[in-house]
Amino acid sequence: MAIGNLDNTVSGLLYTDRRRFYLNENDVAELYMSETPFLSGLMGVGSEQVDDPDYKMFEYRAGWANPKFLANGTATTGVPGTQFAVNCDGAEGVAIDSSLIGAVVDIWDTTEATFRGTAVVVNVSGVSVTFKALGLATSATQTLGNIVNNDVFRVRTTAAGEGVTSPDASTDELEVVWNSTQIIRTPLELTGTLAAANLRGQKERERYRINKGREHMMKLERALFFGYRTGGIGGTANGAGGGTDSTFVNHTTDANGKTIRTTMGVIPALLRYGRTSGDQQNVFTNYLDTYTFDDFADQMDKIAQYAPGGGEFVAYCGSFAYSAWSKLMSDSTFFATGQYNVEPMTTESGLHIKKLFTPSGIVINLVRAAALNYGGDKGRMVIVNPDNVKLVSYRPNLGDAGENGGGSYSSVAYNTNIKTDDGYDGIKDEYFSDAGVGLTLADSHALMTIGATAP
């Protein structure tokens, strides 16, 4: 007598057509979900519509914040009242002209480790600046130290003589930086037959739309991080040996001679215009085996000078950089117990955030960014000042877009049925963006790279 059983042979109908092998035939597990925190953060405050895909932005660096100039020669000084003159150059925040008369300066050696004393400017003729000594507090006779080449004159204030007319005014000007929007297109296409099929899992058009939406958003996120614009965005290329980028438009072309516009992402911008040393340093390289608390405190002090309202920055981190701070917190040689810490993860504005409290008083909001999780980017930490970065869109949203096929973003359009000629038996849709980064005052952002061991 034959007994019915659960046929385990691959040839029977029971096995091939009737058994339900799927735990949930309408669910599909995905390895890579959409993770675009930088883009999401910029979208959260809205994108700015521009009238031209090549756009310019004004920026202003207040000269009065850190005015100084340098000695370009030597001079013998003396006791208070001694007059001396020296040629000068390297002015920052001031001009070497008659507007400098009355400036009270502290004089330091080139390393700013040795203080030579205080003097007041009484005359300027060309590049020759004449001073009168005011004194040196630590000298019994208040005698100033002599001036040598590249000594630093830091302007502290001004002092005018009694009964004199108003001094000559100093002037400054705005600066201009620029960037471009970049066309990013992500199509999806399937035959009419496949689109109509009732399949396990999901309707194919729906599945394509969701995943191509995520792909498109990641492409846009990577453009914001890594995009490179030929000619740069203007300013002094400190990271490339100096020199000033001044070419506004210098785009490349495709194989058919059509213009390819590209946006300059934050990472290349900081590598090109950032500084790797000095008081305005904002590009740092650290290694877990050599990084010290003193290094950390000094670096945070440099970042803190540009602290936005509330003193908080957002740091988009690769996987290694994100976990590196937890490793450092557990290292007693780096942090004394309870001295500074990383706050457990919280959720703000849809982003998962760990707060790094620093000795300089600023807070770094650590956010893991999937776009930085691979290769040489794992140790990168892109620290942005939210006041000086924005998402820029040239063309408005023409449809309904979003990482899950819904929502409305001005920087992303979802255009349907874009291929209809000759009764085409299929469906072709497309995600479309013409967007870029609006990055100003590169000094106010920072790029930190953390490695495992020093080379």
Image (cartoon, rainbow, N blue to C red):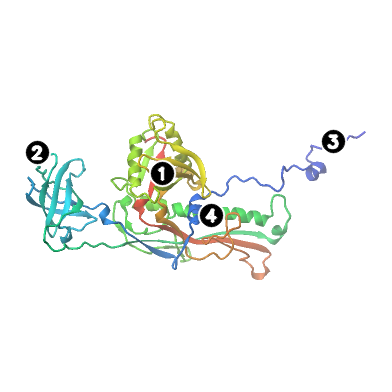
- Distance from disc 1 to disc 2, alpha carbons, whole Å, reads 45 Å
Q: Residue at x 62, y 62 (%)?
A: 428
Which of discs 1 and 4 lies nearer the camera? The answer is 1
Q: Where is residue 200 in the image (x, y as percent from the top left)?
A: 72, 50
Which of discs 1 and 2 lies nearer the camera? The answer is 2
Q: Mark 2 points at which residue?
A: 140
Q: Residue at x 58, y 48 (%)?
A: 33
Query: Neighbour class for label 4 at 10 Å: few (<14), some, many (≥20)?
Result: many
Marks 4 and 2: CB-CB under 8 Å? Answer: no
Q: Which mark is first along the chain, 2 or 4? A: 2
Marks 1 and 2: CB-CB under 8 Å? Answer: no
- Distance from disc 2 to disc 3, alpha carbons, whole Å, reads 108 Å
Q: Mark 3 points at which residue?
A: 5
In this view, which residue lies farthest toward the right? Answer: 1
Which of discs 4 and 2 lies nearer the camera? The answer is 2
- Distance from disc 1 to disc 3, alpha carbons, whole Å, reads 66 Å
Query: Neighbour class for label 3 at 10 Å: few (<14), some, many (≥20)?
Result: few
Residue 423 visible in image: yes
- Secondary element type, mark 1: strand
Q: Which mark is first along the chain, 2 or 1? A: 2
Give the numbered dot on residue 217: 4
Give the numbered dot on residue 363: 1
